[in-house]
Image (spheres, rainbow, N blue to C red):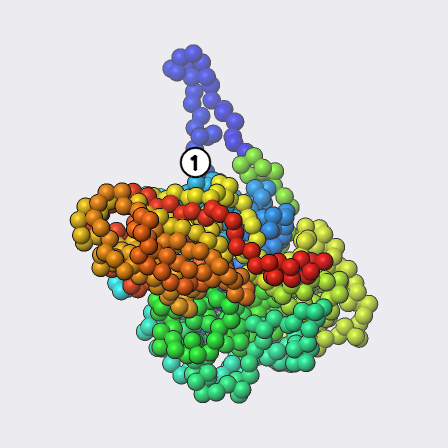
Amino acid sequence: MASRPFRGVINVDIRDSTPDWGPFEPPEAPAGAPNVVYIVLDDVGYSAMSCYGGPIPTPNIDRIAADGVRFTQWHTTALCSPTRSCLLTGRNHTRNSMACITEAASGFPNASGTIPPENGMLPEILGECGWNTYMVGKWHLCPTVEMNLAATRRNWPSGRGFERWYGFLGAETNQWFPDLVYDNHPVDQPRSPEDGYHLTVDLTDKALEFIRDAKVIAPDKPFLLYYAPGAAHAPHHAPKEWIERFAGRFDMGYEAMREQTLARQKAMGIVGEDTELPPMNPIGTPETRAAAANGQPFPPLDVTRPWDSLDADEKRLFARMAEVYAGFLAHADDQIGRLLDYLEASGQRDNTMIVVVSDNGASGEGGPNGSVNENKFFNGIPDDMASNLAMLDELGGTTTYNHYPNGWAMAFNTPFKMWKRYEFNGGTADPCIISWPAGAGADRTAVGGLRHQYHHAVDIMPTILDTLGVSPPATIKGHEQSRIDGVSMHYSVGDPSAPSARRTQFYSMLGSRSIWHDGWKAVTTHPTNNGWSDFNGDTWELYHTDVDRSEVHDLAGEHPDRLRELVNLWYAEAGDNGAFPLDDRSPLEILLTPRPLLAAPRERYLYFPDTAEVPEQQAVNTHNRSFTIGAQVDIPASGAEGVLFAHGARFGGHALYVKDGRLHYVNNFVGISEQKVDGTVDIPAGENQLLAASFDKDGEEPKGVATGTLSLYHADRKVGEGRVKIQPGSYSLAGEGLCVGRDSGEPVTADYPGEHPYRFTGGTVRHVAVDVSGDPYVDLEREAQAMMARE
């Protein structure tokens, strides 16, 4: 913002001078300016919540809808980071350099994971106009190279206009053991799950604390609260009592649930009476899905199993997975209710503008069978039904990292096809509620109603600014601002019949593409994350979405000229928004793409106790290679125990620790099996003891799973040995940290001695060195096959 010139008088003597406080005063919002509470839910499909006809009661979100309007044709990019960048900047995701999630940044202008400073954010604007700016929850707008304490904070919430924030930087986190950051540094959670801890409650506590802290000083100063809980992204974690509220509610299956939901939506006027349900496997026929395309099969994870094809145990498991998700969302709604109760009790609700959205459609990352450990998906390892069934009673608790099967994604996206990642409406059509009781005034037509104008995530930021009477600045922090792609939706609140102010919207995500223009939509059937490439050979379908919202009737054959015009328009819009190159690689291939590091990879890494957890992306990489972990310790007498080194968690990780006087190593393979190697000799007392674990890779299973021998040593004396295999990908989507002398957050194993965080006691850890030197293992046969494939 431009600073005001000094208009006082300056002479040699202050007594002869006249002050002017104007240039130095903090910004002040207009008298009576409203607060803004911006609620961004995660992976909540179009029809999960009751106010959109869904099966999950959300009475507090319903309260917001009753005092506002619901948009029935509001859209997102179909994925987290890209949509969140749109929500805060008003620019299209590829112009924000967010073609995909930040963990999938590819080093191109459309996908660096870094939002350019010329694309200013809402808190940067409102903070300079006199609003306090707070954020709690999921950020996911920072490249992995900056998610650590040695990095710049320029792309953290505190670097993009939020005065205070508390939450997590990456894509997802364990709701029982979250990776928490407070303002500019990581912190431990305030209590354990055994003591009632859950992340959504913690985030709500902090949101209320932030607001109250300032209100006692400046009661009339408005605030922006960006409230972004992890709900309802995987892992689906919820208190048991909330899960049990939904016992038996999903036993009818997802096909029947879709039919019931659609009937409610029609009765509520959310969709038209002629709306039809697409098939459960809507992309192609079973034959074409089974056939190879360009030599590549259809992704097996993107297939839905019909409910009547399941056996009794599978139905019981799948229904329970839906109950857990419902409990998670309902619990989040209850915490939103705490925010509403505070606003009402403090007399602030009427003059608070509340926006509620989701960042994309319901998720299909659980695959056909769902998952008790979603990290398998990111490591390219399929779930198996026997393992999932064995964990049925644990779903939603601390021992699972669970996700429902694809059928429920279709059900929670009713009446649309497909899900998150896809540019069909199942991926992009989402709930959007806007409420400002004081702004509605006596006009009750602006309260509790539906709005059918077509809008997109880029339109929220301009809508908030328009409602507040704030003009976007020409520059922010010295950076000339780029054009805003969004348009204000404010016009539609008071005029339900007004024509849509948006004419065109392009979409591109992980190989899936579409374009909407004046009520018509062209969309490809290209599966996401499949590696097919050959984008010029894509099949494009055509839908008249003004009358066919669920994209059932493909009109490409009847209107080839219109389809051609829309496809050409997609390329024009993609070019204007810098959308290339397109990327449809597999999740494992994307996540294993080399990305910038703050320090160059080296052969030996040195870590110390009593330092902050080292994020996985910046820690030593022991995947698919030989390595040695050596701990230099002082053990004055017997009785030492605890963690020497830990990296990862229950759902993937490894650790070196002391228990019962002996050295132990555990490698938790993607949460599937704990591979333990135990020392056979007591650890001697003494100073400068070297306790080590050394992995010698000698083979490789499919999908890059390294195999070899893990040996334990006291100095140069071998005291244990066993065969282990190493998972190929990261320990979690957002990365699990490395610790020395303790294991913070979710432990790698339940075998640790003592209590969380299992600190090393009875001695002193001086440091831990991890050596990854030596020639990497090479599978000559596999290398030859890869070379032939490249040729």
x then y, percent, for residue 106: 60, 51
Which is nearer the eye, 373 or 642? 642
Where is residue 791? Give x, y as percent.
72, 58
In the picture provided, is 652 more to the left or to the right than 790?
left
Circle 1 sits on which residue? 26
User: Residue 604's spot in the image, x, y percent?
Assistant: 43, 43
Q: Residue furthest front?
A: 717
Q: Is residue 304 above or below residue 352?
A: below
Residue drawn at the location 54% of the way across and 70% of the way down: 364
- Which residue sits furthest top? 12
Residue depicted at x 75% and y 62% = 536
Frontmost residue, 74 versus 510: 510
Image quarter of residue 231: bottom left
Q: Does residue 528 show up?
A: yes
Report the residue at 47% width, 44% height from top: 603
The reply to whether residue 330 is visible in this rendering is: no
Residue 417 vertical position relative to residue 506 in the rendered view, above or below: below
695 or 39: nearer the viewer: 695
Of helix, strand and loop, which one carries label 1? Answer: loop
Instruction: Classify residue 594 as left or right of residue 388.
Output: right
Q: Can you tell which quarter of the image residue 12 is in?
A: top left
Label 1 crowd bin: few (<14), some (14–19), many (20+), radius 10 Å: few
Q: Is residue 326 above or below residue 344?
A: below
Question: Which amino acid type is shown beneath numbered disc 1?
Answer: Pro
